[in-house]
Amino acid sequence: MEKVLKKLADRLNSLDEASLISLWDKYYEKVQQFTPSREWEEDILILSLIQSVRWKNQLFNHCMANQTQERPGEDKTSVRPEVGNKVKKSAKVLNFRPRE
């Protein structure tokens, strides 16, 4: 199982983030229309993978910035990306809760 996940991670890491983000809206719309099907399950996994690549890159950039700059009084243990690192498109991290 771990070998399969490592291969998947390697493959995902080799993809272009901009190309992935261009697909975000398409898959977001698809998963909004829930159907108990294999296709819906695959679509939500694709959306999750796109979001995970974006989050990984934001975290990477945040950590690199922390290494290159010393900021007085900043908590160096934080790994939360800065608010200023927003995606130009409508991509965002989804909050998975039942709708009211």
Image (cartoon, grey):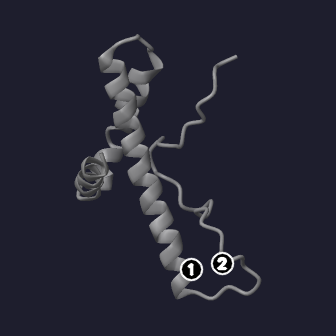
Q: Is residue 15 left or right of residue 25?
A: left
Type of the residue with mark 1: Asn
| Residue 47 vertical position relative to residue 12 in the rendered view, above or below | above
The quarter of the rendered structure image containing the C terminus is top right
Which residue is at the front of the view, 83 or 4? 4
Q: Quadrant of residue 99?
A: top right
Image position, residue 70 (x, y; %): 63, 88
Q: Identify whether 63 is placed above or below 81.
A: below
Amino acid type, mark 2: Lys
Which part of the image, by quadrant, shows the N terminus? top left
Q: Residues within 10 Å of mark 1 (few under 14, many from 20)?
A: some
**Labelled disc at residue 19:** none
The residue singled out by tag 1 in the image is: 66
Query: Where does residue 10 sit, x and y in percent of width and height?
Result: 25, 57
Crowding at label 2, few (<14), some or many (≥20) Cα neighbours within 10 Å?
Answer: few
Which residue is tagged 2?
76
Q: Secondary structure at mark 1?
A: helix
Q: Is residue 65 left or right of residue 28?
A: right
Mark closest to the chain's N terminus, 2 or 1: 1
Residue drawn at x 44%, y 15% is: 33
Callout 2–callout 1 Cβ contact below 8 Å: yes
Instruction: Please tell me which residue lies in front, 31 or 9.
Output: 9
42 w.r.t. 36: above or below: below
Q: Quadrant of residue 23?
A: top left
Q: Which label sits in the foreground, 2 or 1?
A: 2
